[in-house]
Image (tube, grey):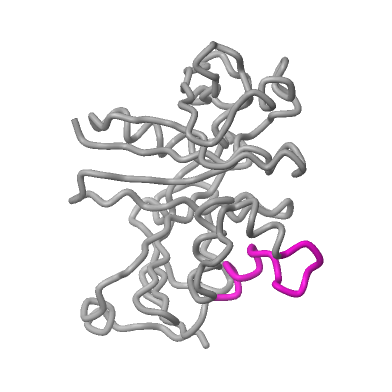
Amino acid sequence: MLSQATNSSVDSEAPTRSLLLVWRDPASRKYSRVAHLEKTDEQSYVFHYLDSARTLDGFYPLDEYPDLEGMYSSRGLPAFFANRVMSSSRPGYKEYLSWLGLEGTADPDIPVEVLARTGGGRATDTFHVVEMPSSDASHFASRFFVSGVRHAEGGLEASQTVHAGDSLLLRAEPDNPVNPLAKIIDTVTQKQIGWLPDWLCDEVDSLESSAWSLSLSVERVNPDAPPRSRILCKLEATRR
């Protein structure tokens, strides 16, 4: 159940996990952070908009969260986010969790982990979810699937040569026609396997601009999965 929270009730709860909701402007295709979703305990969540959401041209509050100044609490993952996670009743659910490296994860943690690793994107809107780097931490880690394996020249072949634990390289692609912050993902032998997911490019650019040192590695290879779920990567960043 969703309710509007008071500031005092939110401040008394230390978040155990914090995700960012990012929105892509349909006209400019630019991604912008617009809100936080904080998991404060096993079943409690708090949602609130960022200051940027109040000044973005073309952005309007979500029906579920109509007040740009408000804070909303709920027991259980709110429907806006829950609808972005595969239902446990779907065929192939357990296999999907294994592709994400989430087999054996405690049930209450699975929805948030799925959102963090997949972005929670839907074909019907322009929102994605990313993990929030902590401003007072010296280490940040995030997981995601390599995008565009099927479309990268030689990507399918190169994807068959990588193994868990292999290092990968990020290469800027400023002339990318869709996103000037795009990053190509290469093997250490300079073979392209795909791209950093579009919805993560702004976050990576922000980390690089803030003097964080980044490393990328293969966490899991799913040879029988569709190309979009074939290579699970782990991005780690530390303050320089």
Left or right of 68, for residue 110:
right
Residue 84 place in picture, x, y as percent: 64, 63
Residue 119 place in picture, x, y as percent: 56, 51
Does the magenta portion include 56? no
The residue at 60%/56% (across/down) is: 120
Residue 195 sits in which quadrant?
A: top right
Does the magenta portion include 88? yes
In the picture, the quarter occupied by the C terminus is top left
Front residue of 16 and 156:
156
Relative to 200, say whether 58 is above or below: below
Residue 192 place in picture, x, y as percent: 61, 18
**Total label count?**
0
Relative to 208, say whether 117 is above or below: below
Left or right of 56, for residue 191:
right
Main SS of the magenta part reads loop
Residue 169 place in picture, x, y as percent: 47, 21
Q: State the residue lying farthest toward the right.
A: 91
The residue at 57%/31% (across/down) is: 163
What stretch of residues is rendered in magenta?
A: 78-93
Residue 94 sits in which quadrant?
A: bottom right
Front residue of 181 and 114:
114
The residue at 78%/62% (across/down) is: 92
Front residue of 168 and 171:
168
Residue 102 sits in which quadrant?
A: bottom right
Relative to 145, say whether 11 is above or below: below
